[in-house]
Image (cartoon, rainbow, N blue to C red):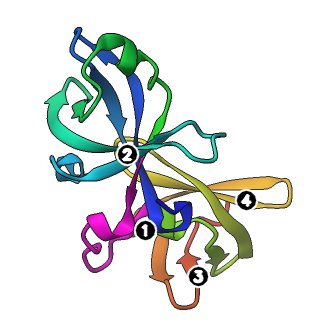
Amino acid sequence: MNKATSFTIGKVTGVHGLNGNLKVWSFAESFETFCSGKIVLLKAVEEAGGKEYTIQKALPYKKGILLTLEGVDKRDLAEDLIGKEILIDRDQVPEPEENTWYWQDLYGLDVVDHLKGFLGKITDIFPTGANDVLVVTHETRETLVPMHKHFVESIDMDKKTVMTTLPEDY
């Protein structure tokens, strides 16, 4: 699985029971991203390779997902996976609908404000419950931009640019 053509869709946060079930914090908006039969790669952030697994079952669980992977059928095997990221190849996820984007596609885009000019590049994104927030970095300055129609005017993937309209005192 190639990091350039894959998405991080979650992170293993713990285990559940004795049969190797994993507690997962999902980064995916759709629970269907974890449907059975899909192949995922589990790896530590600093790890080069990782290991591929096939999803056997996924169920909603509290604020995350309870995931069963083929070959992980004992608690000790599951415990070895705590803290690992879960990645999936782009060809296993549907293309985003119009005016929606995968976070991975937004990283590195230039952010330009109508009044302030170039703000920087998107270096991180985090959810807040209401809206996702873009972390825009330029040299030593970070600007947080809510992904809301009042602030993000347009995203042009061809030009790799996000146009914003931030308040003057922002």
Q: Nearer the viewer, mark 4 or mark 2?
A: 2
Going by the numbered disc 3, the residue's amino acid type is: Thr
Residue 137 is labelled as: 4
Work out whether 40 lies above or below 24: below
- For marks 2 and 3, the one nearer the N-term is 2
Give how far apart the Cα atoms at labels 4 and 2 are: 22 Å
Work out whether 131 lies above or below 72: below
Residue 150 is labelled as: 1
Question: Quick one: SS at disc 2?
Answer: loop
Give how far apart the Cα atoms at labels 2 and 1 are: 24 Å
Contact between labelled residues 2 and 4, with CB atoms less than 8 Å apart:
no
Contact between labelled residues 3 and 4, with CB atoms less than 8 Å apart:
no
**Residue 110 placed where, x, y %?**
65, 76
Give how far apart the Cα atoms at labels 3 and 1 are: 17 Å
Q: Residue at the bottom extreme?
A: 158
Question: Quick one: SS at disc 1?
Answer: loop
Which residue is found at the position 36% from the left and 20% from the top? 78
As drawn, is 167 to the left or to the right of 138? left
Question: Quick one: SS at disc 3?
Answer: strand
**Residue 85 placed where, x, y %?**
47, 39
Work out whether 128 lies above or below 87: above
**Residue 15 placed where, x, y %?**
32, 16
Query: What is the number of callouts on the image?
Result: 4
Contact between labelled residues 4 and 1, with CB atoms less than 8 Å apart:
no
Q: Nearer the viewer, mark 1 or mark 4?
A: 4
Disc 2 marks which residue? Answer: 27
Which residue is found at the position 52% from the left and 42% from the top? 50
Give how far apart the Cα atoms at labels 4 and 3 are: 14 Å
Work out whether 63 lies above or below 48: above
Disc 3 marks which residue? Answer: 161
Magenta region:
87-103
As drawn, is 84 to the left or to the right of 118? left
